[in-house]
Image (tube, rainbow, N blue to C red):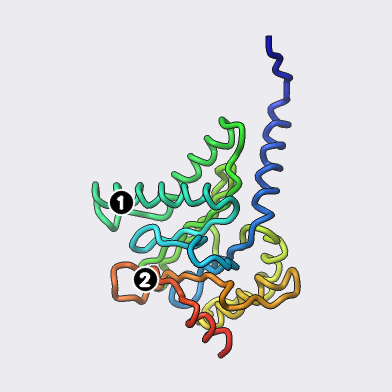
Amino acid sequence: MSFMPYVAPEQLMKDRSDYAHKGIARGRSVIGCEYREGLLFIAENPSATLHKISEIYDRIAFAGVGKYSEFEDLRIAGVRLADIRGYSYGREDVKARDLANAYSQSLSMIFTQQMKPYEVEILVGEVDGGAVGTALYHVLFDGSVTDEHGYIAIGGHAEDLMEELRQRYQEGWDLTTAVKTCVQVLGAPESRTIEPVAIEAGVLDRTRTHRRKFRRLDDDEIARILSG
C-alpha cells in the first residue's frame, strides 16, 4: 500500500508560496500607475502577440505576470464573467471590484486545494468619467487582494521597482511623463535601457468619448514618447 508522509499544514502552505514566488520572480515586471487622465499599465514584453496587458470590459483592464497560460486563463474567465454580468444586468454594473473578488476566490481555492498553485500575480484596473474615478486592485497567487493607490509594481524585482516608484512618483503626471518614468523604473534594477520595441503599454483613458476606455499604445507612439 502507498504511504503518504505527513506534512504540517503551515509547511505545506509555505512550500506552495515559495514555489509560486519563484515562478513569478522569473518573469518580467508590470507597473500600474495613475496618471492625469486615468490608468497606465506598462511592461517589458518583447512578444508582439503574447500580451501581458489587455482589456476586460468597457472601463476595465487586466495585467498579469508569471506563467502566461495561467494568467491568460484568468483573463478569459474575467471577460466571460464581465460579459455575463453586463448582459444580465447592465454594462454599468460591471465593476473591477467584483472581478477582483472573483479572481481572489478562484486563486484562493486553487492555492489551498490543488497540488500546484498558479504562478501568477494580476492587476485589475477601472476608470469612469469622473475626475477621481479610478480603482486598482492587486491579486496575489494565494487569493490575497489589495486596493492600491497611485502605483504598484508586480513580478520580478517588484520590491526594487516599488522603491524606485516611491522616490519618483508624483500625482498628476501626464501620459508622456508617466510612460518615460515607468520605462526608466523598469530598467533601473539592472541599470539598463529598455528599447521601445520591448515595451507593452495600455491605458484606461477616462476622457475618451467612446464607451470603451482602453487603448493600447503602439510601437510608434511609445518610440515617439521615449524619444521626445
In terms of image quadrants, where is residue 94? Answer: bottom left
| Image side of residue 52 versus residue 88, left or right | right
Asked which quadrant contains residue 186, the reply is bottom right
What is the number of the mark on residue 83? 1
Where 204 sits versus 144, above or below?
below
Residue extending furthest toward the top = 1
Badge number at residue 130 = 2
Q: Position of residue 203 (x, y in %)?
A: 45, 71
Residue at 50% over, 44% down: 104
Q: Secondary structure at mark 2?
A: loop
- Screen quadrant of the C terminus: bottom right
User: CA–CA distance between discs 1 and 2?
Assistant: 23 Å
- Residue that appears at 28% across and 52% down: 86
Position of residue 42 measured from the top left corner of the image (x, y, whole percent): 55, 69
Image point 62% across, 62% down: which residue? 29
Quick check: 159 above or below 166? Answer: above
Q: How many marks?
A: 2
Please name the amino acid that badge 2 sits on: Gly
Q: Nearer the viewer, mark 1 or mark 2?
A: 1
Q: Residue furthest bottom?
A: 228
Q: Is 166 drawn above or below residue 154 in the view shown?
A: below
Q: Position of residue 115 (x, y in %)?
A: 61, 32
Q: Amino acid at mark 1?
A: Asp
